[in-house]
Image: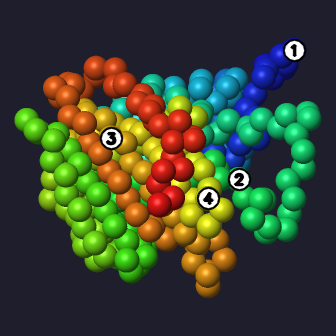
Amino acid sequence: GCCTSGMAGLKRREKSGCQELLEALPTADLLALTDTVTRRMIHVTSRTEAILAIVTYSESARELLKRRKVQRDTIYTYLVNQGIVVLPSLDKNQLIDQALEYWKEPVIQENQQPQPTEAGPGSLDYQLLGEQFCQWFFHLLNSQNPSLGQEQGEWGPQHFWENAILKFSYNTSKQNTEEYHGAQMASLRLLALVREEHLFLNPNLDASGLKCVNSPHGLVVVAVAGTVHRDTLCLGIFEQVFGLIRCPLGGNNWKIKFVNLKIVGQCPLEAGTPVPRPSIGYQTSELCVFYG
């Protein structure tokens, strides 16, 4: 029988993800990979055919990504280009896990109500908004860290309301609290954390690490927890609460009204130690105190 019988194969999102990832491989590697995956049964004449054959004949996305020709850095670069916050210290297997997580098909429950399509105030999925905002915010902020060598995005006061407030607390031997008023000061202080102090903030965007609520006055409060790193060390955990208000002009454009950032240090964990996945301590009801 043909070697494809009984194969689970790649799901739709895995296929398109792997195709994009394989584009980065040199032609010689693609041809070698095609021979391995198809057991030399398929003769290809172009890169496109090679990629198609590889994703068609691979048993699973994990099996494909584990192949020697698919290097760690290729997976890392792919994830970063997707706007995903990736720790530079992850090894190849951890990166594979992250790619597979990213390609998971969205689960649609049978009994889900169809979402109203009109942009009424009730139709926004705030958890999704919070998740997308966090992916954008942390990717942009971390890209300003010179030790990561990433392309730096457009960080600046334009993402904050003019009268924004940043409250920043951290513990050294004692509890320190700083407060900054105005878009310019708030954005500069956050920038200094990554640019001067080389910190890397890695948010936990699953349900335990991210909570979102919306107020009747159009303020959306997003609370997120995560870990703080410098190079390969995990320095502690952070909790960050954002208040977002939609710009009246730009459709789905939200700007930051306030940020409360709290960093709790701990003894640095060496690379390779399992890093905790922090969760948000606030209950959703408690977030309402931020409406002020």
The CA distance from mark 3 to mark 2 is 25 Å
Q: The residue tagged with tag 4: helix, strand or loop?
A: loop
Name which of mark 3 and mark 4 comes first in the sequence.
4
Q: Is residue 72 above or below residue 253?
A: above
The reply to whether the C-beta atoms of the residues labelled 4 and 2 are less than 8 Å apart is no
Is residue 195 visible in the rendered image? The answer is: no
Residue 98, given in percent of the width and then of the height, sits at 51, 34
Q: Residues within 10 Å of mark 2 (few under 14, many from 20)?
A: few
Residue 1: which numbered mark, if any?
1
Q: Of the residues tagged 4 and 2, which is closer to the observer?
A: 4
Three-letter residue code for mark 1: Gly
Is residue 8 visible in the rendered image? The answer is: yes
Three-letter residue code for mark 3: Phe
Q: Which residue is mark 2?
A: 125
Q: Of the residues tagged 3 and 4, which is closer to the observer?
A: 4
Q: Is residue 153 above or below residue 248?
A: above
Q: Residues within 10 Å of mark 4 (few under 14, many from 20)?
A: few
Name which of mark 4 and mark 2 comes first in the sequence.
2
The reply, left or right, for residue 28 in relation to residue 35 is left
Q: Is residue 161 above or below residue 239?
A: below
Q: Which residue is mark 4?
A: 215
The CA distance from mark 1 to mark 2 is 48 Å
Q: Which residue is mark 3?
A: 238
Q: Quadrant of residue 91?
A: top left
